[in-house]
Structures are given as structure tokens and as C-alpha cells.
Image (spheres, rainbow, N blue to C red):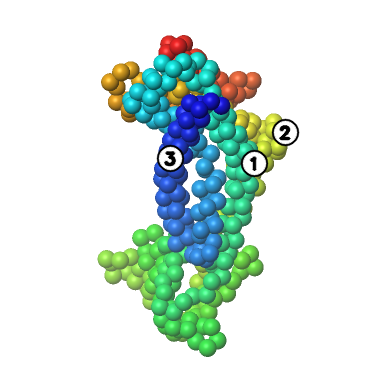
Amino acid sequence: MQILQRYFFRELALNFLGVTGALLAILVIYQFGAVLERAAQYQYPRGVVLQLFALGAAENFSLLLPLGLMLGIVLALGRLYFESEMTAAQACGFGGLRAWLPVALLALLVAALSGWLSLQFAPKAATMRVALTAQAVRAGLAEPFSPGRFRSFDGGRTVVYGAGSGAAGEMQRVFIKQSAGEATITTVAQRARREAGADGLSQTIVLLDGERFEGVPGTRQYHLLKFDELRVPLAPPAPTPTPTRLDALPTLTLLSSTEMADRAEFQWRLGYPLMVIVVALCAAPLGRLRPRQSRYARVWQAVLFFAIYGNLAIAARTWFEHGATPAALGIWWVHVPFLLLAWYLARRHA
């Protein structure tokens, strides 16, 4: 590559990395909040939270590459045109295929990365995340109750509190609140112990020497029960590994399947690297500016272009899965209009 080509490739790559890093930060914040919410709901161990967070972010990273590449190219070209660097380069004979080479090289590298992520890495990450989630749920349920700490089950409908613990591992001065529709069930006991089910998910709290109040708040209809021993089952709706999840199936399995959903998933994974090439072909002519235009003048057009492209791709997959489009057509056709648009833009700015 010539000096100008290396310079332009560096500008394109730096802007791509900067935009993709910003998008990744947004994804990380979203993933972190979702993982923390589920960790609080199912009482995940602390060491598992970061692993689930990293796997979820890595699994969805391929979604960011097409948008990051398009905005990176548009922003880089906007700066080069705005500061007249591209005009000076063109005056020196830099144009035609030589000007397209840095864009093509960056697009091919990003497409290769996107293909590896969507075809190989993302399914493995999804499988690991599902298995780790089930393991985290079991570990969270097996974690002993801590004195003075509230524990919630059944999506927050059941709250358990123990003021202390005995020498035999029993909880002392136990409080349990359960919500059953409009009714509220409050149970207090002097002692309690926990028994785990054979499946490792269901649990039963055995309460000893206590009272149970059941009724609707705001009314006088309450039932009081005194007991020597009472068993309270806890069965939170825990996620379990689902081998039929499409995002966790290996790509070779999808390739040999005849199911419409599997074929749609396979074409969807292949669509990521193809989308990278298409957005690069559109971004290169779209990023060209006229004199005195703002360096960010084309950003909104790039965002609008990608929004239409991405939503149309999602709609094409849904139509294909429901049989609204012919099986032979698949979801490949969604890339054709944008390839034609790239050809039109290139001819227009030639």
C-alpha cells in the first residue's frame, strides 16, 4: 500500500475502533444491568456474575460491527473532506480504485471477524451462558441463609428472613412473607431448617414452633394458625438448559437441518459478514462531502440507512420463518436493494 493508502486506512480503522468501542460500552452497560437484575432475582454467586456478563456481551458483539464500520467510515471521510485532506490527495492523483482499497481492506477484515463471531464463537458463548446460568441458579439456591439478610424467591413473591443461626445450622427467629394474589401470608417461627429437593432447584423450609397469618390487607378477614411444624415449599421458576435454542446450536447442525427456523438462523448468521460488506460499499460514497458541508452532515443518513437495513433484515427473517416468503428466496433478498443503492451512490459520485 502507498503512503496515502496507509494513512487513510489508519484513519478509517481508528474511527471504526472508536465508534465500535462506544457502542460496546453501551452494550456493556445494558448487559450489566440485565445480569445484575437476574443475579439479584436468583441469588447468583458473586463469581459467576462477571462470567455471565462477559459471555453475554461477547455473544452480541457481532451485532455492533456493521453499524460501527459504517459510522466509522462516514466519520473518517467526513473529517478528511472537511479538512480538505481528501481534496489535496485527489489533486495528487489519489482516486479511483486506489481510494477504495483502504475501505475494501478494512471491510474484509471486519467481515472475517464478524463471520468468525457469528458462525463459531457466538453459538459456543450462548451454550456456555445457558449452562452457567443453570449452574448459578443451583449454586445460589444452595447458598446458606445469612443471619440478618433478606432472601427473595419466586420472583420476589416470597421473602425469607432469619435473625440468627443456631449451632446445628438452623435459622432462629424466622420471618416469611408470601404473596398469593391479593392475600398476604405472614409466617413467624422460632426455628427453621432448609431441605433441598432431589432436583437441586426446589427447596422446602421446615418451620418449628410458630404462627401463620393469612388474609387480605385492609380487611378484617384473617386466619391464624399456630403450629409445631410447618413445611413451606420454595420453587422459584429457574431457567434450565434448553438444547433447542437456536442461538446455541452449532452452525454445522443448522446447515444440515431442513427446519425453517434452523434455516433462517443459519442465513441470519451468514448475513452478518455480508452486511458488513454492504454497509462498507454504501458508506464510502455516502461519506463524501460537498464544499462547506459539516463533517457530521452524513451521520444522520448513515444511521437512517442502517436502521432501515437492520429492521428490514429482521422483518425478512420473521416472514421467512412464518412462510410468508418462498423458501427458495430465504432472507438473502434483503441485501439486494442496498447493494443496488451502493452501486447507485458509487456511480453518482464517480
Q: Are there few (<14), some (14-19), or many (20+) residues within 10 Å of tag 1? A: some
Q: Position of residue 43 (x, y in %)?
A: 49, 64
* Location of residue 80 by image quarter: top left
Residue type (three-letter) at the residue carrying disc 2? Ser
Screen quadrant of the C terminus = top left
Q: Residue at x 50, y 72 (%)?
A: 232
Disc 3 and disc 2 in contact, CB within 8 angstroms: no
Disc 1 and disc 2 in contact, CB within 8 angstroms: no
Question: Circle 3 sits on which residue?
Answer: 18
Q: Nearer the viewer, mark 3 or mark 1?
A: 3
Q: Are there few (<14), some (14-19), or many (20+) residues within 10 Å of tag 3? A: some
Q: Residue at x 35, y 23 (%)?
A: 84
Q: Nearer the viewer, mark 3 or mark 2?
A: 3
N-term-proximal mark, 3 vs 1: 3
Residue 303 visible to the viewer: no
Q: Are there few (<14), some (14-19), or many (20+) residues within 10 Å of tag 2? A: few
Question: Circle 1 sits on which residue?
Answer: 120
Residue 146 visible to the viewer: yes
Front-most of residues 158 and 317 = 317
Relative to 31, 111 lies left or right: right
Question: Circle 2 sits on which residue?
Answer: 256
Q: Position of residue 29 (x, y in %)?
A: 41, 50
N-term-proximal mark, 1 vs 2: 1
**Mark 3: secondary structure:** helix
Q: Residue at x 52, y 19 (%)?
A: 98
**Mark 1: secondary structure:** helix
Relative to 50, 128 lies left or right: right
Residue type (three-letter) at the residue carrying disc 1? Gln
